[in-house]
Each structure stands twice: as structure tokens, then as C-alpha cells.
Amino acid sequence: MGEWFDETFKDQVRLGLRVRRSLLHSKSEYQTIDIVDTEPYGVTLLLDGAMMTSVREEYFYHEMLVHPALTVAPSIRRVLVVGGGDGGTVREVLRYREVERVILCEIDALVTEACKTHMADFHVPWDDPRLTLVFRDGVAYVREEGEPFDVILIDGADPVGPAEGLFTSPFHESCKRRLTRGGVLALQSEAPFLMREDFLRIVRSLRGVFPRVHPYFGPAPIYPSGSWSFTFASATVDAHPPMPERLEQIETRCRYYNRDIHRAAFAQPNDVRRALGARCV
Ligand code: SPD
């Protein structure tokens, strides 16, 4: 690896980070795994050459994937995280006292092993007795009959390669079946401007499955364009308001998320409203 690492999106946009040194370059059954120490963002995980997460800016993404769902869902006793082998998402989930059981279903055990070794600054409580690691394909895991979940969080990579199945309607249907009544699904839904077609396809797929679907937005400095989307979906629950007793547990520990960010993140720009067939003000 040279002095710079560049991620190229569709041969049209390039995001470069100055690299101090490479900590790991390996190839698993599913993908290439790199961990590099970068000037701007510290230790950074790359899968198949795409930036996944970094020690210095991961909190934007992980807090926004987790807390809008966890502050709103009626019950948060049982939580499933699909993907997210770096552990940032489960770290945020485990902040809540009411959480009794968290399953992390990651397809690639080598990703988790690499992150445990090289990304200790993520401070993931891997030994928390509430956490169970399952190294399996999340699509197959969710499709099977099994214990129900109050919240499912999908922390996949992009919709190419091993994570592709996580962005399909059959998978969204399986998630609905595995949720309890009042259950909430939240997932990363790509860049709302640069990857507009992917974003809209994901939201439309969810709308075909769940009666209540709310896209929301946040910053993601290491993803192409720096602006990211997530989508909240449920059969019975809307994305507001967050519960005061849940906010009290986590707001002071978060670096980005708070009740004002929660409200603001769900505001939809006019072009998104139009594309989704909603009225503009
Ligand atoms: N363009 C990269 C999108 C990756 C989203 N998931 C990252 C995993 C972080 N836990």
C-alpha cells in the first residue's frame, strides 16, 4: 500500500486518505480485509477496498444506526445485529440496561478477529455476557425459524459482494417475520445523493413490506460523498418520540446523537420527498 489509500466509486468519485502504515492485509473466504492506520481517521477497516469504519469518526455512523431505533422501540430486550463484525454497533446497543440479549450475526469471522486485534480503540465489550457471536450468512440466519427479536439492525457493507442479499425484499420480509409485534428494523441505506438509486430502491423495498418506513440522514466522513442514510421500519411503531428514560441512559455518553439530532435526522429534503412520492411543503 502506498502513501495514500483511494476508494473509487464507480470510476467517478475518489476519496483518498493518507496512510501511515498497513497493519493487516489478508484475504478471507469472502473478501479482502485491510486494516490501515491513516492520518485523518486513525485505524481504518477496508473490505474489498471499500472503507468500512475508522476509530476517529465511527461514532457518527454507529450512533445513528442504533439510537433512533433503540430509543423508540417499545421493547429492546432482544436485539439482532446482522453484519457489523467490527463491533461498533453492538457496543452502542449494549449501553442500554434493558438489553438482555444481543446476537451479532457476521458472515466473516476473520473480520471480527482482525478488528479485535487491531481496533481495540473501538472499546467493544466483547466479553459482555449478553452478547453472542454467530458467524453465519445473515440472510440464511434471519430466514430460519428461531427466536424473535425486538430490534433488528442491519449493518452491512455495500449492496455488492457478500452483503448484497441484505438489501433485497425477500430479506426484508424475513426480518419482518423475525420481529416481535412492535418490533423495529433499522438499516444503513447508502448515500442519499451519490447513491440515490440504491437509496430509493432500499426504501421502496421496505415500504413494500412494512407499513411504517422512515428514512433518516447523518454524516459519514469516510464514505463517498460524506453524507449517509439509514432507514427505520416497523409494522406498528413510528420513529418519534424517543423515550425520555432511554435518552437519559445514553445521551451523555454519545458524541453525536441526542434528542435534537433525532428529530432533525428524520427531516426529508424536498428532492427525497418528491422521489418517494410525498408532498413537499
Ligand atoms: N460504503 C460503506 C458502507 C458500509 C456500511 N457499514 C459499515 C460497517 C460499520 N460497522
Image (cartoon, rainbow, N blue to C red):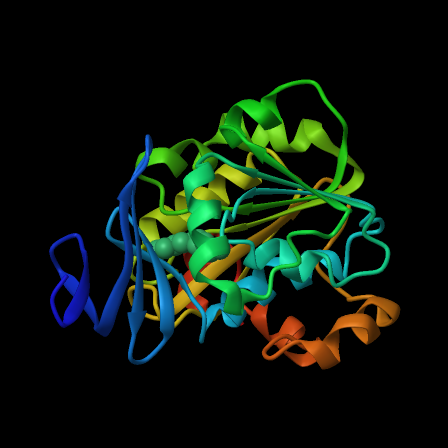
Residue beneath the point at 84% across and 51% down: 74
Quarter of image, res 251: bottom right
Is residue 217 visible from the viewing direction of this image? Answer: no
User: Which quadrant does the N terminus fall into?
Assistant: bottom left
User: Residue 78 vs residue 263: left or right?
Assistant: right
**Image label count:** 0
Quarter of image, res 32: top left
Residue beneath the point at 56% across and 59% down: 88
- The x and y percentages for residue 29 are 32, 30
User: Residue 210 vs residue 107: left or right?
Assistant: right
Q: Name the quarter showing ligand 1.
A: bottom left
Residue beneath the point at 60% across and 79% down: 255
Q: Is residue 235 above or below residue 116?
A: above
- The x and y percentages for residue 118 are 42, 60
Pick whichever, 92 or 233, lies toward us. 92
Pick whichever, 233 or 117, lies toward us. 117
User: Residue 160 vs residue 205: left or right?
Assistant: left
Pick whichever, 133 or 255, lies toward us. 133
Residue ranking furthest to the top = 145
- The x and y percentages for residue 260 are 67, 80
- The x and y percentages for residue 110 are 42, 41
User: Which quadrant does the C terminus fall into?
Assistant: bottom right
Residue beneath the point at 46% across and 62% down: 119
Is residue 104 visible from the viewing direction of this image? Answer: yes
